[in-house]
């Protein structure tokens, strides 16, 4: 149990006219905004939400994860904007949990704390050569091309003709597509300026995606696959023999039809049979292959050894890959590992290292040893359930967490902070991080970026350093 101080809330339980329920949400991505929205919607509860983010800008992966050529997905920020209009909502950007404020600080100012920090790193492949120069995680590349201030200075050797992307999830598809798009396609987007410049000079001719299972098990979604077939100057290549289903999958699909998987298989077979479109770039999607070794020349990536897999069925009916004797090698100078994101621990907050999540029950954070819920401490989004699902998946996930929070408020099972007022919290935050960004600051930055975009004929030009953001605000 981690109680705050013993000062009781005036009027008993917080959430009434005398004492609002004060909630801190750490992480301004979709899960954080959906949690804030559901809390602020409670008519019978007087609640105040302070949302924190280590970046000056809100929206998490909507700004720094969603691919720049997917602008419609980013429209969800209009919903978050409406939440932020609520006078009981405040945003404190450029405030890092663990640096400017600790979990103990939050407990002194809030009745409830919700961690919605997402999954900030990537899973490792665990094969030799993974750490060579030229081997990167997809998370780094995605954050780089999206103008994330912490990743903007990374360098990727785009002079390489062949690039491998390990994994066939939607992130791998994003990475492959961005590598294959033409400059004309990219300059219509809000991709970071420096990334546009680097990609304009790209010498990449071939991108090879490596799926460890078959076409029916591929993690990418159908619309994402379909989109690959419509790129201006790149064609998808699928080997006909790899587009064919293995006997086990055929049997499985005939016994348990899966319309979504079938649609993807049909399209992949169509792509495998398509004639050469004569485009300048190739995007090869391989199936039933796993990298076993990233080979080296002069200290950097030179190629990848891959082994062919076969599928077997586990006791719970899942198809898993296992290596066969057949192996091959291809030369490539750049590799992106896109095998899933992974949460990172926050000091003072329990963490399940293997799963990369905060241990919890329906969003109530639990002690690592005893599995007992920790008073007033919650989580939502990827740090709660792992890095799966689309942006909208976080809505139901956050609502589940908020339901637990509301149940706990009802029975008075909340923290008892020493300073449960908005003013006290703001004063304290100002002391720790005078350069915090409010939501009004964000609105000015947003307008500024859109105006820069208008001048350049683009939807927006992102500011990618904290200094340039401060400067734009006249600070
Ligand atoms: P993901 O969907 O879980 O895909 C991970 C991929 O890595 C799978 O192909 C997986 O294969 C493969 N993989 C895992 N371990 C591997 C290993 N050791 N060796 C080789 N391959 C391995 O994760 P994601 O692509 O990072 O996406 C995260 C979430 O964000 C997903 O829910 C995704 O749909 C969502 N997202 C959506 C969009 C969009 O809607 N446009 C865009 C980006 C992300 P197995 O299937 O065999 O495990």
Image (spheres, rainbow, N blue to C red):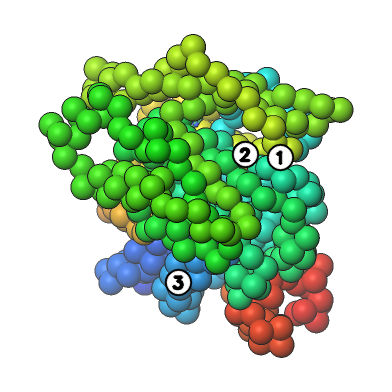
Q: Image check: 317 left or right of 465?
A: left
Q: Which residue is mark 3?
A: 72
Which sits earlier in the primary sequence, circle 1 or circle 2?
Answer: 2
Q: Nearer the viewer, residue 445 or 282?
A: 282
CA distance separating discs 1 and 2? 6 Å
Q: Image check: 466 left or right of 276?
A: right
Which sits earlier in the primary sequence, circle 2 or circle 3?
Answer: 3
The reply to whether dot 1 and dot 2 touch (C-beta < 8 Å) is yes
Disc assigned to residue 116: none
Residue 214 place in picture, x, y as percent: 37, 33
Q: Residues within 10 Å of mark 1 (few under 14, many from 20)?
A: many
Looking at the image, residue 386 lies above or below residue 56: above
Q: Which residue is mark 2?
A: 164
Q: Nearer the viewer, residue 439 or 74?
A: 74
Q: Residues within 10 Å of mark 2 (few under 14, many from 20)?
A: many
Q: Nearer the viewer, residue 78 or 170?
A: 170
Please tell me in which quadrant of the rendered image residue 215 appears: top left
Q: Let me know if residue 35 appears in the view.
A: no
The reply to whether dot 1 and dot 3 touch (C-beta < 8 Å) is no
């Amino acid at each position: 149990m981690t109680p705050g101080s013993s000062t009781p809330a005036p009027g008993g339980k917080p959430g009434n006219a005398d004492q609002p329920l004060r909630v801190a949400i750490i992480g301004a991505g979709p899960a954080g905004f959906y949690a804030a929205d559901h809390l602020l919607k409670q008519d019978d509860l007087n609640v105040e939400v302070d949302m924190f983010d280590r970046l000056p800008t809100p929206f998490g992966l909507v700004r720094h994860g969603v691919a720049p050529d997917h602008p419609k997905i980013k429209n969800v920020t209009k919903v978050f904007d409406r939440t932020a209009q609520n006078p009981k909502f405040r945003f404190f950007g450029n405030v890092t949990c663990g640096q400017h404020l600790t979990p103990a600080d939050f407990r002194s100012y809030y009745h409830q704390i919700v961690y919605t920090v997402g999954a900030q790193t990537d899973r490792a492949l665990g094969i030799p050569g993974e750490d060579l120069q030229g081997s990167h995680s997809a998370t780094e590349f995605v954050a780089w091309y999206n103008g994330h201030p912490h990743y903007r200075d990374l360098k990727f050797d785009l002079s390489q003709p062949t690039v491998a992307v390990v994994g066939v999830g939607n992130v791998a598809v994003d990475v492959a597509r961005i590598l294959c798009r033409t400059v004309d396609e990219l300059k219509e987007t809000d991709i970071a300026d420096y990334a546009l410049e680097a990609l304009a000079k790209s010498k990449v001719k071939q991108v090879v995606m490596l799926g460890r299972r078959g076409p029916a098990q591929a993690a990418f979604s159908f619309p994402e696959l379909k989109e690959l077939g419509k790129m201006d100057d790149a064609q998808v290549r699928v080997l006909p023999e790899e587009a064919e289903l293995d006997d086990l999958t055929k049997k499985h699909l005939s016994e348990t039809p899966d319309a979504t998987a079938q649609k993807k298989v049909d399209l992949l077979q169509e792509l495998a049979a398509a004639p050469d479109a004569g485009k300048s770039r190739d995007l090869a999607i391989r199936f039933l292959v796993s990298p076993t070794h990233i080979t080296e020349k002069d200290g950097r990536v030179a190629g990848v050894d891959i082994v062919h897999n076969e599928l077997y069925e586990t006791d719970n009916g899942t198809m898993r890959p296992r290596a066969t004797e057949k192996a091959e090698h291809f030369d490539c100078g750049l590799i992106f590992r896109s095998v899933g994101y992974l949460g990172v621990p926050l000091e003072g907050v329990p963490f399940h290292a293997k799963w990369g999540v905060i241990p919890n029950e329906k969003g109530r954070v639990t002690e690592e040893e005893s599995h007992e819920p920790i008073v007033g401490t919650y989580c939502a989004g990827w740090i709660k359930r792992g890095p799966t699902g689309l942006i909208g998946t976080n809505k139901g996930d956050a609502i589940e967490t908020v339901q637990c929070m509301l149940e706990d408020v009802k029975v008075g099972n909340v923290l008892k902070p020493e300073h449960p007022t908005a003013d006290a919290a703001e004063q304290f935050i100002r002391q720790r991080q005078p350069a915090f960004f409010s939501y009004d600051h964000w609105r000015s930055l947003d307008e500024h970026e859109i105006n820069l975009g208008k001048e350049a004929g683009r939807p927006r030009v992102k500011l990618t350093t904290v200094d340039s953001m401060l400067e734009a605000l006249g600070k």
